[in-house]
Image (tube, rainbow, N blue to C red):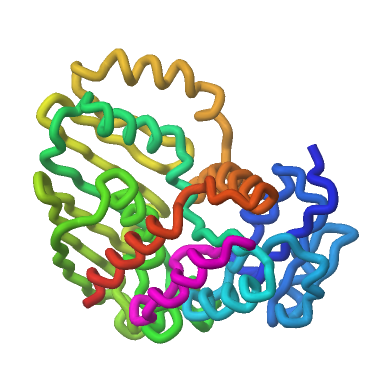
Amino acid sequence: MVIKEYAHAIIGCGRIAPIHIKALQDNGVSSILLCDIDTRKAKALTPAGDQYFNDYQTIPLDMLDSVSVCTGHDSHIEISKYFLSRGVSVLCEKPLSVPSYEIGDFLKICRRDKSTIFSVVAQHRYDSIVKFVKKLISSGRLGQIVLSDFTLYCNRPNSYYSESSWRGKKESEGGSVLINQAYHLLDLIVFLFGTPQDTHSFLSTHFKKNVIETEETACAFIEYPTHSVTLKATVCSNELWYTRIDIVGTLGMISFSIDEPFRIFEYSKSIEEDVTFFLRKDKKLANKKGDLFYFGHSHELQIRAFIKSVQSRERILLPSIEEIEKTQNLIQKLYL
């Protein structure tokens, strides 16, 4: 299926840009424009027959329906404002901004402007395993949630930071493992449990002191009225990427990953029938591979929802402006 006369630009041609390109192509977008201050990067990624630019302000606005903002964290809101104020809808890569930026005024504009759509990439909200677990929680199949643990072990070599000038710097990235790699875990905490009551965090850097200004390891304690959540994440593991989420309730528990493909490690006897039915139903989807196993394939699903919202002008996608604000507020509290 080709979406006729739908044009989308990707601003920033780094690691995540090819994922957006593939997701757009899989959704039949007819025209994909690329933009990067390094013209060679933009040219290398531009599909045949499409155009590339080295300054987003030179892209003819009448060519565009929407854009993806895939630049460094500190420029996300600035670029998003530029396009939204000119009537172009925006899908912004995570996070919305660096922790020190006051997001309130920007989100007020997003709420007030009914002519454009704005959202932040949170593709794991579209994962089938995440939707299944959310239903287990909301339906009461796990009982009252008592305790949850969110874990990320990954490896980012020194070259990962040196190859992009904005990474590992407080001013431009705002943080490292917590705001970048662990962002999706924090977003899922908000998605599954809502706004927390209290937070505590411990951020440290021991092995990359001479490489980054920001944290390489993070531990957080996130408190809700009736249960507690712990989070631990590091970029100094020998594992390229490993996630595990454990959710324990008074009637049952489940442990799973959001890697690609997802895994269910353990579950209680009380939900065996639910899990068996889900796995049987999800078999085809679980075999679908994303380009990078830690990104998964749900960018395609979120971008499809985004395009539908742009075309209908209805804000029917996840996350909503309110949910974006909740996740960003949680991040800001953990960096205080």
Q: Which residues are magenta?
A: 91-115
With 200 as the anchor, is 46 left or right in this view? Answer: right
Q: What residue is rendered at 16% in x and 63% in y? A: 199
**x and y percentages locating residue 244 in the rendered image:** 29, 43
Q: Is residue 314 left or right of residue 256?
A: right
Q: How many numbered dots are placed on residues in this image?
A: 0
Displayed quadrant of residue 9: bottom right
Which residue is most to the right? 49
Decide which of 256, 108 is in the foreground and name it. Answer: 108
The front one of 19 and 86 is: 86
Q: Is residue 220 above or below residue 151?
A: below
Name the spot of residue 102 as percent of width and height, x first: 37, 79
The residue at 65%/73% (across/down) is: 83
Q: Is residue 11 magenta?
A: no
**Residue 108 painted magenta:** yes
Quadrant containing the N terminus in the rendered view = top right
Seen in the picture, residue 258 relative to 54 is either above or below; the reply is above
Q: Can you see residue 178?
A: yes
Q: Nearer the viewer, residue 291 or 311?
A: 311
Residue 70 drawn at (x, y percent): 58, 68
Quarter holding the C terminus is bottom left
